[in-house]
Image (tube, helix red, strand yellow):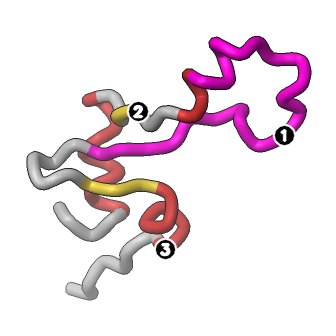
């Protein structure tokens, strides 16, 4: 059986915590920020956790399954 390769694009975008949670950056914060309110921009700066339903396939793509 061949080994699974890690998805290199995903490894650059997410970080796995010691407890197995996956931290990610929020979308819509790259450019065109002038139309967004300050509250929204501050919220976009923060990292968030990947929801439970996506964790298993992402861990498999990261080669940690």
- Of the numbered discs in the image, which one, if any, rests on residue 62? none
19 within the magenta span: no
Which quarter of the figure has residue 30? top right
Q: Position of residue 47 (x, y in %)?
A: 44, 37
Q: Earlier in the sequence, mark 1 or mark 2?
A: 1
Determine whether label 2 and label 3 are within 8 Å by CB.
no
Q: Position of residue 35 (x, y in %)?
A: 89, 18
- Position of 28 relative to 8 (above/below): above
Q: Which residue is mark 2?
A: 48
Q: Which residue is mark 1?
A: 31
Q: Earlier in the sequence, mark 1 or mark 3?
A: 3
Which quarter of the figure has residue 56? top left
Q: Which residue is mark 3?
A: 8
Q: Residue at x 9, y 47 (%)?
A: 19
For the residue labelled by badge 2, is the local secondary structure a helix, a strand or a loop? Answer: strand
Compare residues 2 and 24 and report the one nearer the observer: 24
Q: Dot 2, crowdedness within 10 Å: few (<14), some or many (≥20)?
A: few
For the residue labelled by badge 3, is the local secondary structure a helix, a strand or a loop? Answer: helix
Q: CA distance from mark 1 to mark 3?
A: 24 Å
In this rendering, would 7 be left or right of 58? right
Mark closer to the observer (2, 3): 2
What residue span does the magenta drawing correspond to?
A: 22-42
- Position of 9 relative to 41 (above/below): below
């Amino acid at each position: 059986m061949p080994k699974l390769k890690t998805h290199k694009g995903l490894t650059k975008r997410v970080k796995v915590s010691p407890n197995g949670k996956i931290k990610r950056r929020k979308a819509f914060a790259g450019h065109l920020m002038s139309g967004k309110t300050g509250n929204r921009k501050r919220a976009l700066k923060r990292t968030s956790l990947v929801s439970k339903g996506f964790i298993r396939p992402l861990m498999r793509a990261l080669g940690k399954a």
